[in-house]
Image (tube, coloured by chain):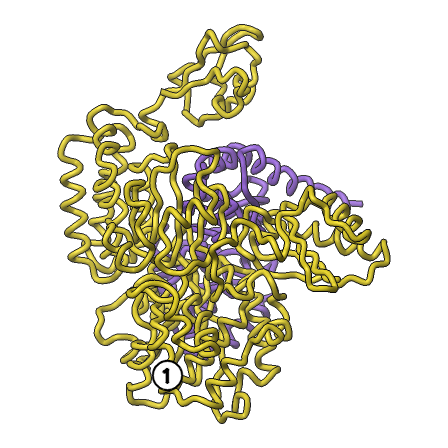
Chain colours: A yellow, B purple
Amino acid sequence: MIVRIGLSSCGIAAGGLPVKEALALVIEQQGLDWELQQTGCIGMCHYEPLVDVIHEDGSINTYGNVTMDGAREIVAAEASGTALEKYRIATDREPNDCLAGQVRIALRNCGTIDPESIQDYINSGGYQALQKAVNQMTPKQVIEEIKISGLKGRGGAGFPTWFKWNATRQEPGDIKYLICNADEGDPGAFMDRSLLEGDPHSVLEGMVIAGYAIGAATGIVYARAEYPLAIKRLGKAIEQAQAHGILGSNIMGSGFSFDISIKQGAGAFVCGEETALIASLEGERGMPRLKPPFPSQRGYWDKPSNINNVETLANVPWIIANGGASFAAMGTEDSKGTKVFALAGRIKRGGLVEVPMGMTLREIIFGPGGGIKDDKKFKAVQLGGPSGGCIPEALLDTPVDYQSIKNTGAIMGSGGMVVMDETTCMVDLARYFLNFTQDESCGKCVPCRIGTKRMLEIMERLCAGEGKPGDIDLLEMLGQQIMDGSLCGLGNSAPNPVLTTIRYFRDEYEAHIYDKKCPAKQCKALITYLIEPDKCKGCTLCAKKCPVNCISGEAKKPHVIDQNLCTKCGTCLEVCPSKWSAVSVS
Amino acid sequence: MSCCCQTEESTTIQSVSTAIQLSALEDLINRYRGVEGSLISVLQGVQELYGYLPRPVLEHISLQLGMKKARIYGVATFYAQFRLTPVGKHLILLCQGTACHVNGADKIETALCDELGVEMGGTTDDRVFTLTEAACLGCCSLAPVMMIDGQAYGPLTPDRARKVIRDIYKQEEQSREEVGA
């Protein structure tokens, strides 16, 4: 028997490590000859810590939200040959609802193998695609296979992968670089972290194949410093690959040599832009430059360089092993294959899902995503992070492919889907994103540096209840000018969240400006907390918890909030027992 | 933040390095001497040693590696990771990602500031904690999240966040007592 526990960042945050210790202890105490393994994230982050028990006959029981006590109970039950229903969320024959409709290509091994074991990866078919590529195919054939697959960059822009490879290959020169962009900067996207933590070898294999195709001998992973576990596991994977002759000289006897190193980013969103990333790799400030020349012509140290995103590269071994046509058989005319989405926000089942392109937003959010938290009303879904936009309920049946999403005003981006319900203020959300891009603007070009600042000032005014007639028009005009006049993708797309929310939620902007009201009751300057005297039983809980002591009243008598002192933190609303619900917001 | 050209600071490389073996810094400098494009790695190494980028150390690096101080300062202030002031023993990164934002990260911030008695970016008087923001920690399904010393905590409520801090304080006290005993 094998007991497998999910230990990626989400599993560890949910308390996976003590559960693992509890499992190890009880297995030892009972003298069981069971193997305890770790694995990455299967994507059902809301069920973490997750434990799989794999029986001798191959059948699997999956347990979710396992506590330390639960771990002991599960081992006891399984040792006596039964399952513990209290924690069981799925079996191998009856997969959990979250996995229904998913087709896992990039995530094929996440949550099923030990990411720190190269043998596990090899046992599940890993490095066979590399063997095939370097020993049976020419670089041109590899590029042709990727062309047939229709694979497009999964990091944001959605550029055809084969085209970039081919362009870099055709450039003259002996020294070329393959760069893996693991600087997942979009707040709300975490598929690259999960891939690097859960299946680092798939990314390495994709890199070696890409290096072979473009004629590079050096690969570099530019990884976010905020992902310590991903960097650790990737580093371990590189060492193992080197020891197995999968990295280094004369790979698998093919005569092709390639090695990979990791460079840690230092925290700058703009470094997701290719030329900025290269500047950062060279140890400089991550500032973009004009294109052309494109990185495929003059990239890292002025040499032809190809940059691919983590998820793109993780797809590559599968395509080479199974053929480009099988990948292209999935998805839509415009967007082939599958895409990983990170579901987060006000959603019931947050996590990672991989589905064929062309599934509708509704199918994803209400299928694997399970719908809206606390059964509240869906309001919008944000796609593409700070460069993307908000898609309203009326457009929920939009199929998820590059073009259809672009038509809504949002972008596919890296696949972050943040779901919003009626409690999210769209004006505040747009302000939040603009605050982010304004902060992350590198400052090189004026429209982005100063334009986003001016837009942010207007948004802050709106949220503070100081909006003026004409503000909406001014935002639209400024937004258009910033998009037209900025040098790189950051500025070109920074106004998107504001422009799409104006487009679909204009009434909320107008309510902030003309009625001085926040319909979602989120903007502190526009709301008031009140204790309803007929409902308040005087339990004193709110008065005790109020951080600024602005609630007064005798025990068992209605309490009152001093509006002059209230900081609108919402603590009173949170702590007021639901049977009374005496605190209201208006 | 004052300009790096000013030389009023009285601390020297020796005085900031008292707690750290100077040899560790020299090892770091020697490792990257002559390696093109390694400034960010050097600064990450310095921050690993000192917890922040002390100005005398940056000046020392400027001399040793033959880089203009302005260039070092430019890189050090461009990236969110680098800090020019000392931090507490434990660094709290409060996630400001979208998922955390819509799940009430601002309430966690209020609770943490109140519990620690600092503003965002501040360090407690006893230098045990520094509270900072991170753009996104990528643990969105556990929002709202914070990371302390590389370990993520979530989903947080204001009370849970306070408890995490109190638990770490307790551990600190215990280890101090053990050392004392």
Residue A177, percent from left and from top: 39, 80
Q: Is A251 or A474 nearer to us in this picture?
A: A251
- Write the residue at 72% across / 46% down: A84
Query: In which quadrant will I find the N terminus of chain A?
Result: bottom right
Count up the numbered dots: 1
Residue found at the very far front of the displayed protein: A93
The answer to whether residue A120 is seen in the rendering is yes
Query: Vertical placement of A347 versus B11: above or below?
Result: above
Q: Mark 1 points at which residue?
A: A214
**Amino acid tagged 1:** Ile
Q: Nearer the viewer, residue A15 or A202?
A: A202
Q: Which quadrant, please, contains the C terminus of chain A?
A: top left
Question: Relative to B32, is A406 on the left or the right?
Answer: left
- In this rendering, does residue B133 appear at all? no
Locate residue A567: give its quadrant: top left
Callout 1: SS: helix
